[in-house]
Amino acid sequence: MPSILISNIGEFFTGDLARPVAKISSLLIDQGRIAALDPPPDIARDKEINAEGLAVLPGLVDGHVHPVFGEWTPTQDALGWIGKYMHGGSTTMISAGELHTPGLDYENLTPDLVTSLAEVTRATTGGTRWGGVKVHAGTVLLVPGMTEKHFDRLAAAGSILVKFIFFPLEACREEAEHYTAWCRDRGIRTKVHTGGVSRSGSSRVCGFETLSWLRPDIAAHVAGGPIPMSDDDLDRVIDETDFALEVCSSGNYRSTIRAVARLKERGRLDRLTLGTDTPGGTGVIPRGMLRNILLLSGVCDLTPGEAIAIATGNTARAHGLDVGVLEEGAPADLIIAGPVLGSAGTTLGDAIAHGDLPGISFVLVDGEVIVDTRSQQTPPPATVAHF
């Protein structure tokens, strides 16, 4: 794999909420990882990308997608969606369950069926790079009657996440607590559907009372997916718990503003993660993660660096992944982007703060150039990077 120097960087977003921006003007990529920040100008490299003053930021991490098999989604009868999301800046995706598989009867799920579905999806959709994207598929839809052997199978398959969505949590509390413990023993994260009933009509309503004892690793779409919990429940979840809280493109914008403001007020933006909760009834949204960033910065008044860090480092960390932060030794998953012609912003940060969609010029995953010069899903930046 060739080494690549990215030079003439105008803005550098780290993906680390504690220090979201840094004065970095160049970086060296070697063997798929960031080898050096601001290396000597004469350092050896095989190729060079001139960023032409554009910004470099981590590849976006979509913490809530619903794949089925590969790049086909039956919910919108669409093909090729994963590669299109990559052109919208998403380089990592985490499945929140492959629940849209045709013929899946939500009322008659069995332990062996849901475990086998997760194994197959992990080995197919999660076993290949689709459009260069790192897809973590194989998220089991938990049901009563599972044993430790089922969780052994999930761990052996490489699943990183399980999902409570159809599980009768209040009626089977002790069993749910066993599942959580078994997952943590195996390094598997837990996520739970929150708020009202989903598009399926078969999910369970979940608010503060359930979350207060279940204590998942991540509470999904707390601002709605599509319907949020009550305002009082949302406030109590923020005030009285400490697990990760996810907001998604599919949610209630008013509840998102409320949640972000309350987390910011309490100094706990580190808990906030992002996803699109697509494909689904909300549609297929290649620019969904970019839109999430614009909502957080342009409407919720977070800084562009904070919004980007939540969409990258925060979300990756909550799911136990090593991506999302640009530092020496980290995977070279990154975007080169800037304001589009006519934007109110003269820099990427200015554009995001104004709520303007940025233009993507390059996308790299593990140091491999996937998008070269301009994205298929955003307008071109006013200035493009180039080899």
Image (spheres, helix red, strand yellow):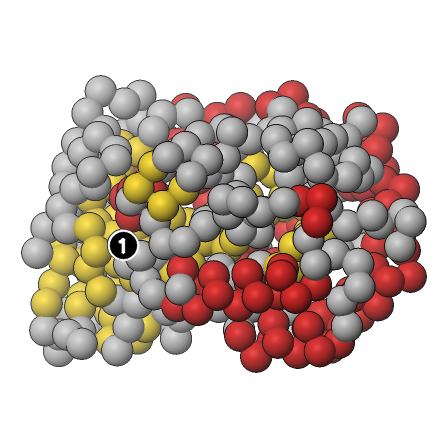
- In this rendering, would 244 be left or right of 383? right
How many marks do you count on the picture? 1
Relative to 254, residue 112 above or below = below
Which residue carries the number 1 mark? 131
Residue 87 position in % (x across, y down): 27, 44
Q: Residue at x 42, y 25 (%)?
A: 355
| Quadrant location of the C terminus in the rendered image | bottom left
Q: Left or right: 264 with respect to 332?
A: right
Dot 1 crowding, Cα within 10 Å, few <14, some 14–19, many 20+: some
Please give the name of the residue rendered at 31% of the width and 21% of the height, measured from the top-left corner. Answer: 344
Kind of residue at disc 1: Gly
Left or right for 216, reference 352: right
Location of residue 118 (image quadrant): bottom right
Residue 311 pos. (x, y %): 49, 46
Residue drawn at the location 40% of the way across and 60% of the way down: 125
Task: Kindly tell me whether residue 132 is visible in this rendering.
Answer: yes
The residue positioned 41% from the left and 24% from the top of the image is: 354
Question: Is residue 13 in view from this perspective?
Answer: no
Q: Nearer the viewer, residue 3 or 286?
A: 286
* Vertical comparison of 285 with 254: above or below: below
Mark 1 lies on a secondary structure that is loop
Residue 65: x %, y % from top left? 50, 46
